[in-house]
C-alpha cells in the first residue's frame, strides 16, 4: 500500500513536470498573447476614458456658451475667447511635453523641432476650426442649447461622407442606416406643434448648422489623417503645432473683427467666471477630441458628441426651464 502510494505520487509528480515542460515550451506564445491582450486592454481603457471625457465636456459646452450671455448677448469678445482657448491648449500641450521630457528624455518622436513638410499641413484644419468655432457662438441667436446639440449631430453625416471620399474608408450598411436615422431624428426633434412654423429653427440657423457640420467633418477627417500619418509621433507635439496656428489665425480674427473694442475696452472686457469656465471647457474638449482622433477615429468622436445631446437636454431642463417635448424625445431616441 505504501509502495503503491509512493509510486502514485511519483507518477503525479512526473505528470506535473511533463505538463510544466510543455507549458514552458509554449511560454513564448503565451507571453506574446498575454502582452497583446494587455496592450489591447490598455488601448481600450484609454479610448474609453478620453471618449467619456469628451462626452461630458461636450454636453456642458453648449450650456456654458448660453450661460455666458447677458441679456441675450455676449458682453465679451468672442474672438478673444477663442484665442485664449487656443493659447490654453497650447500651454497644456507644452506642459505635458515637459513632463515627458523630464521622465523619458527628448527623442525623435517627442521633440518640437520638425520639418517644413510636417508643419505645413496644420494651417488648414486651424482655419477650418477657427470659422467653425466662431459660427458656434453666433448660431445661438437662432437656437437653444438642446436644439444646437441636435443640429450639431449633422456632422456625423458629413464625417461619414468625407470618410468615404477622403480616407477611402468603407462604412457598413448599419452605419449608413444610422446616418439616415440621424437625419430623421434631427428633423423630428425640431418639430413644433405649437407654432405655424414646421421647424423651430429659422433658415439662418439651418444654414449655419450645415456649414458648421461640413467644416467640422472636413476638419476632423483631415486632422485624423495628419495624426495617424505618423503614429509614433507624440500627440502633444502634433497638438502644439496645430494650436500654434490656431493662435495665429485667432489673433488675425481679433484684429479684423474686434480690434477697436479690445483697444478701447480692454482684452478681458465682459469676462465673468462662467466665461472662464467656458474657455477651460473648450480647451479640454479640444485636447480630448485630438486624443480620440489619435487613438480611435472620428466616428467615435461624433457619436460621443451625439450622446452629449441627451445630457445637455436633461441639464437644460433644470437650468433654463427647457421643455422636453414628445417630438424632442422621439428625435433624440
Image (cartoon, helix red, strand yellow):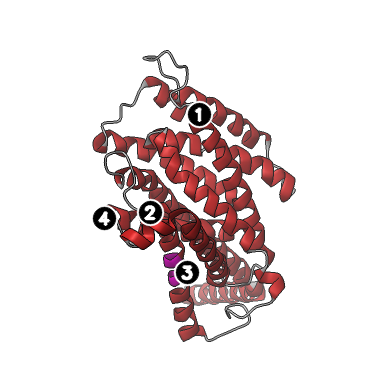
* Residue 129 belongs to the span the image colors magenta: no
Q: Nearer the viewer, mark 3 or mark 4?
A: 4
In which quadrant of the rendered image does the C terminus lie? top left
Q: Earlier in the sequence, mark 2 or mark 4?
A: 2
Q: Which residue is mark 2?
A: 77
Name the residue located 54 percent from the left edge and 77 percent from the top edge. Answer: 10
Q: Residues within 10 Å of mark 1 (few under 14, many from 20)?
A: many
Marks 2 and 4 sit apart, C-alpha to C-alpha, by 12 Å
Q: Which residue is mark 4?
A: 272
Mark 1 and mark 3 in contact (Cβ < 8 Å)?
Answer: no
The number of numbered discs placed on residues in the rendered structure image is 4
Q: Earlier in the sequence, mark 4 or mark 1?
A: 1
Q: Nearer the viewer, mark 2 or mark 1?
A: 2
Magenta region's main secondary structure?
helix
Q: Which residue is mark 3?
A: 90
Where is residue 300 drawn, in percent x and y? 55, 48
Marks 4 and 1 sit apart, C-alpha to C-alpha, by 33 Å
Residue interval drawn in magenta:
87-92
Marks 3 and 4 sit apart, C-alpha to C-alpha, by 22 Å
Q: Nearer the viewer, mark 2 or mark 3?
A: 2
Mark 4 and mark 2 in contact (Cβ < 8 Å)?
Answer: no
Label at residue 186:
1
Amino acid at each position: 500500500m505504501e509502495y503503491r502510494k509512493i509510486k502514485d505520487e511519483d507518477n503525479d509528480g512526473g505528470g506535473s513536470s511533463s505538463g510544466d515542460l510543455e507549458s514552458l515550451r509554449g511560454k513564448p506564445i503565451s507571453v506574446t498573447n498575454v502582452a497583446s491582450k494587455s496592450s489591447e486592454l490598455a488601448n481600450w481603457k484609454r479610448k474609453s476614458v478620453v471618449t467619456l471625457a469628451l462626452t461630458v465636456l461636450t454636453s456642458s459646452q453648449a450650456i456654458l456658451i448660453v450661460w455666458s450671455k447677458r441679456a441675450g448677448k455676449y458682453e465679451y469678445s468672442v474672438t478673444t475667447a477663442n484665442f485664449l482657448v487656443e493659447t490654453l491648449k497650447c500651454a497644456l500641450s507644452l506642459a505635458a511635453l515637459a513632463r515627458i521630457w523630464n521622465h523619458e528624455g527628448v527623442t525623435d518622436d517627442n521633440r518640437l523641432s520638425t520639418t517644413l513638410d510636417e508643419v505645413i499641413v496644420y494651417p488648414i484644419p486651424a482655419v477650418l476650426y477657427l470659422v467653425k468655432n466662431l459660427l458656434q457662438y453666433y448660431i445661438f441667436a437662432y437656437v437653444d442649447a438642446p436644439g444646437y446639440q441636435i443640429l450639431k449631430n449633422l456632422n456625423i453625416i458629413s464625417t461619414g461622407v468625407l470618410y468615404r471620399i477622403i480616407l477611402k474608408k468603407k462604412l457598413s450598411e448599419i452605419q449608413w442606416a444610422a446616418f439616415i436615422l440621424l437625419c430623421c431624428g434631427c428633423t423630428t426633434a425640431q418639430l413644433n406643434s405649437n407654432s405655424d412654423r414646421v421647424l423651430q429653427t429659422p433658415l439662418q440657423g439651418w444654414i449655419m448648422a450645415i456649414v458648421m457640420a461640413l467644416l467640422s467633418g472636413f476638419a476632423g477627417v483631415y486632422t485624423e489623417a495628419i495624426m495617424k500619418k505618423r503614429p509614433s509621433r507624440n500627440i502633444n507635439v502634433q497638438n502644439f503645432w496645430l494650436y500654434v496656428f490656431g493662435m495665429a489665425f485667432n489673433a488675425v480674427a481679433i484684429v479684423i473683427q474686434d480690434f477697436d473694442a479690445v483697444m478701447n475696452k480692454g482684452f478681458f472686457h465682459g469676462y465673468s467666471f462662467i466665461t472662464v469656465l467656458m474657455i477651460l471647457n473648450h480647451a479640454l474638449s479640444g485636447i480630448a477630441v485630438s486624443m480620440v482622433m489619435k487613438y480611435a477615429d472620428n466616428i467615435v468622436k461624433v457619436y460621443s458628441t451625439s450622446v452629449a445631446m441627451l445630457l445637455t437636454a436633461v441639464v437644460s431642463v433644470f437650468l433654463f426651464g427647457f421643455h422636453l417635448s414628445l417630438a424632442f424625445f422621439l428625435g433624440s431616441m
